[in-house]
Structure formats: C-alpha cells, structure tokens
C-alpha cells in the first residue's frame, strides 16, 4: 500500500484535478494523519461478519 | 406587545390563531419588524421573504376566517435553513458558487410544511455548505452574548428562534448542526432518527449522516412540527415508512419509571465545570421527577468521533468532487480543506470506518435495550467567542456526531445558564423511531424548570 506522505497527497490531488494550495495540502495532511492513525488503531479484528457493516438504519420496534 | 408575540411557542400561537385572538398577519409583521431591527447584529437570515410572507399570511387569514383551517400549523411562520431548496427563492448554501441559485422545486420538507399551511419567512444563515465558515453573509451570533458564535451549521436558525426572529425553523444535522446551535442559542432542537424525515431537496453533505429536523422554542413545538415533517417520501429512498404518531400525545406522560442511561465514558469527561454542574443538576431534577438514572458503558465513545469525521469527509467529497474541480478557488478555506480531505481516504479506510460504525451502533443499541434514553451534555463548554471560532474553531461535535453515526434520534434542550449568561444544552438520545419518549422526557423537564422562558436582552450593534 502506498505510504501516506505529503508528496503522495499532492500527486493524488493533481490526478483528481484539485487545485490545492500548499496551505490546503498541509492542513489536510495534518488532519488526515490523525484520522488514519485513529482508524488503524481501532481496526476491527474480524472483517467478515454475518451482518452488513453498513448497519445504521435500524427497524422500528 | 409585538415582541411578546415573537416569543410565544408555536403550541400557544396555534391556539391563539384558532380562537382568532391573533392573526397570521400580526405574527408575520411582528417577526419582520424584529428581523429589520436585529438581523444586522445576529446575521440570522440570508434572505427574508417579506412580500411573499405577508401575502401568504393574508391568504392564511382568509382561509382560516372562512373555516378552512388546515391544522395546527396553518398560519404559523417557518424559517428554512439556506441549504433547503425553496422554489423561486434563492438558496445559496452560503457559497460563492451558488449566490444566484434559485431552485425550481421545493424540498420535500418545505412542501410538507407549506401543505400544512406554514408561511415561509426566509432563509437562515448556515456555514458554507454546512461545513465551512460564514464569511459572505456574516457570522451568526448567539443572542445571549453577541460577541459569541451561534454555533453551526444551522446557526441562523438557532439564533433566529432564540431571539424572537422566528417561531420555528428547519435545520440539518450531519455532525451536530441542529443540536450545537440549539444548545449555544438556548432553544430545543431535534435530530430525528435517520430516515424519519426526507432529505430530498436539501443540499447533501454526508448522505449516511445527514438528518433534517426542527429547531423551536420548546420541546412541545418540536413534537408539533415533527409530525408534519416526518414520513416516507418517494423522492428519498432512505426515508422510512414507519408510521408517524401524534407526538404531542406523549408530552404529558411524565418520566416516572423511565430509566435514563448515564454514560461512564467520554460524555462527562473534561467538561467545563459550569457545564458539569448544570447538567448534573438537570439529572437530579429528572430523578426528582421520577426517572431512574442508570450508569451505562459506552467504551468506544471516545474514539468514534474520528470514524464520523472519516465518513463525513469521504461522503462530502463525493457530493462536491465535480464542483471542487471547477470552482475550487470559490470555496472558503475551511470548507474546501474539510471537503477535499475526503479525496485522500482510501476505499479500505472508508470500509473500515463503516465497520466501526456498525460496532458502535450495536454498542449503543445494547445500552438502549436496558434504558429508555441516554442523557449527556450536548456540548462540553457553553460558548465560543466569534474571534476564536473564526481563527481556531474548537471541536464541537464531541457529544453529537456519535449519534449521527448510529442514526438514533437526539434532542437537545436548555438546562441552565453559566454565570456569564450563556445557555447550556442537555442531550437526550433514544431508540430508533422513538422520538416520542425524548419529547416526553424533555417536556417533563421543561415544565419543571424555567430556562425555556428566558429571553435574551438584545442591543442593536452600531
């Protein structure tokens, strides 16, 4: 998997047609570094479950 | 007298209209006068529908006089958040890219309230696309201290209701955007269950976390308005066909015997001391009314905010990708940075976040199987100075976004004030489609306190 670096972020922005400024890239990089680390730290051990992972709409009782 | 009229709850105004003690024209005129006086200070409205509101009020007056009253909302004014599409009325989303956008059709919520006889008073201020700043039309301020931010994103709705510039308003809530401004402005606001209210015609931010709901002076007003807003909509496939009850019948049932879950993690940690004292006093009041507090565990609560942030950013980017490519420079700094961040999350990370959402939802459902509602502070602090908000905004979705992730209904209502006179919000979270129990608890608390009757002292800024 590609490492998350500022260089990758800038290249990906260009590939997606986003005109990020340097300040934008820096702010986004700082924020996403925290988010990606938090997601990785909480990784669900079993990725295969009987339930759909998208369980946020619940039936009425 | 006119100012008195502007602070009456919808449940009172509807009775007065029914008995011809007040007319829709008087109400609309009084509100327009206050908007003229205070909008430059509070930045509540982006667009005021003066002529059409007066014309619609006269029409409502004629219909009601002729014995054709449509129901309890007929003749009452409504203010819509400016991301809610209104046919023939400019809908800017507080964005440079939409300054001239005039929708050709109403959002479903607009149509439903119009069918119920409500009169569109105007379009309220919002942060840019419900995620950025309020640079173009001014930063909305809480009427309890106009050097302080109203909260967002539905800040114009919150401060308009609080200041008597609206009776009822619509808001949208993706990470807390109904509940946060409601708390900071001292009004009641409901994020309904996901699927309870159609989002058709409401500019999307995050399709799996966007909710539309009422912001009102009282809990009873929220109950009254939700009944008209709710229900299945063929234009919104995520809307639910679960029957819509008459929520107002729940209001007088009291809280005796209800079990209230008090989370032992996250929600009561690191609170501002005044918020802590105020919320704990509210818990004691609910206990005195007959409810039973029950300690509950929600161990994932502390970390779940990142999951919400990841899903929100990814989905917001999905909604904005095309516009961002062509109009990037026309986005405000904060909106574009927050939205564009979604471009750099991987599919695996999105799926990871969705799985964590499922785990968290089951955790909350397990708690709600044991208690009737969960009670938390809406926010950990009571006010945000405008200059702080504009320079380095604090994290505000701390107590709210966890329930955007799960879709559970969540109501906020005022539960006191700080020494500086800023309101504190109490959040009640219920089972899916059980808004009725939240109204029951909120109304019982409200009736036993006087917070909702307080009025801000406003001065016109030079």
Image (spheres, coloured by chain):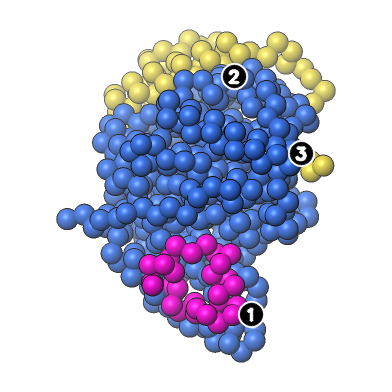
Q: Is residue B414 above or below residue B356?
A: below
Instruction: Tell me the residue that label 1 is attached to.
Output: B69
Can residue B126 be seen at all in this image of the molecule?
A: yes
The colour with which the image depicts chain A is yellow
- Label 2 lies in what chain? B
Q: Position of residue B136 (x, y in %)?
A: 29, 49
Q: CA distance from mark 3 to mark 2?
A: 24 Å
Secondary structure mostly seen in the magenta stretch: helix
Q: Earlier in the sequence, mark 3 or mark 1?
A: 1
Instruction: Tell me the residue that label 2 is attached to.
Output: B265
Q: Position of residue B74 (x, y in %)?
A: 59, 73
Asked which secondary structure carries label 1, the reply is loop
Span of residues in magenta: B1-28
Q: Position of residue B127 (x, y in %)?
A: 39, 45
Task: Name the residue nearer the viewer: B251 or A59.
Answer: B251
Q: Position of residue B162 (x, y in %)?
A: 42, 54
Q: Residues within 10 Å of mark 1 (few under 14, many from 20)?
A: some
Specify whether residue B62 is painted magenta.
no
- Label 3 lies in what chain? B
Q: Is residue B238 above or below residue B15?
A: above
Question: Which residue is at a point 61% across and 56% down the rendered structure image?
Answer: B220
Q: CA distance from mark 1 to mark 2?
A: 50 Å
């Amino acid at each position: 998997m590609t490492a998350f670096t500022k260089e990758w972020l800038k290249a990906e922005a260009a590939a997606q047609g986003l005109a990020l400024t340097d300040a934008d890239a820096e702010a986004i990089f700082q924020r996403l570094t925290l988010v990606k680390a938090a997601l990785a730290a909480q990784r669900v051990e079993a990725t295969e479950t009987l339930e759909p992972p998208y369980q946020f709409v619940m039936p009425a009782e | 007298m006119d100012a008195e009229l502007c602070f009456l709850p919808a449940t009172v105004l509807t009775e007065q209209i029914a008995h011809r003690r007040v007319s829709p024209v008087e109400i609309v005129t009084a509100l327009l006068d206050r908007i003229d006086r205070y909008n430059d200070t509070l930045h509540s409205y982006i667009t005021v529908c003066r002529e059409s509101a007066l014309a619609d009020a006269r029409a409502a007056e004629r219909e009601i006089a002729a014995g054709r009253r449509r129901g309890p909302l007929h003749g009452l004014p409504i203010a819509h958040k400016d991301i809610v599409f209104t046919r023939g009325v400019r809908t800017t989303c507080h964005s440079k890219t939409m300054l001239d956008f005039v929708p050709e059709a109403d959002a479903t919520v607009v149509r439903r309230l119009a069918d119920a006889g409500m009169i569109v008073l105007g379009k309220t201020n919002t942060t840019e696309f419900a995620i950025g700043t309020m640079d173009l039309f001014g930063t909305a301020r809480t009427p309890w201290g106009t050097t302080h931010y109203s909260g967002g994103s539905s800040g114009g709705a919150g401060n308009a209701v609080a200041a008597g510039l609206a009776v009822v308003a619509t808001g949208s809530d993706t990470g807390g955007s109904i509940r946060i401004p409601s708390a900071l402005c001292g009004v009641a606001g409901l994020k309904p269950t996901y699927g309870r209210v159609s989002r058709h015609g409401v500019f999307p931010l995050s399709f799996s976390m966007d909710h539309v709901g009422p912001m009102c002076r009282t809990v009873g007003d929220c109950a009254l308005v939700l009944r008209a807003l709710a229900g299945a909509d063929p234009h919104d496939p995520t809307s639910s066909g679960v029957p819509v009850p008459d929520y107002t019948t729940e209001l007088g049932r009291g809280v005796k015997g209800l079990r209230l879950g008090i989370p032992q993690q996250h929600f009561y940690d690191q609170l501002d001391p005044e918020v802590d004292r105020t919320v704990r006093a509210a818990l004691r009041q609910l206990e005195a009314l007959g409810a039973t507090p029950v300690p509950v565990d929600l161990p994932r609560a502390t970390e779940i905010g990142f999951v919400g942030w990841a899903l929100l950013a990814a989905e917001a980017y999905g909604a904005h990708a095309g516009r961002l490519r062509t109009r990037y420079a026309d986005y405000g700094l904060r909106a574009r940075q927050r939205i564009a961040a979604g471009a750099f999350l991987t599919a695996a990370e999105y799926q990871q976040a969705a799985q964590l959402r499922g785990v968290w939802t089951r955790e909350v459902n397990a708690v709600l199987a044991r208690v009737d509602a969960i009670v938390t502070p809406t926010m950990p602090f009571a006010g945000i100075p405008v200059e702080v908000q504009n320079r380095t905004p604090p994290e505000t979705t701390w107590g709210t976004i966890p329930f955007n992730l799960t879709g559970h209904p969540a109501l906020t209502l005022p539960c006191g004030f700080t020494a500086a006179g800023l309101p504190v919000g109490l959040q009640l979270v219920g089972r899916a489609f059980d808004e009725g129990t939240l109204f029951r608890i909120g109304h019982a608390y409200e009736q036993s306190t006087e917070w909702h009757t307080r009025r801000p002292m406003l001065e016109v800024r030079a």
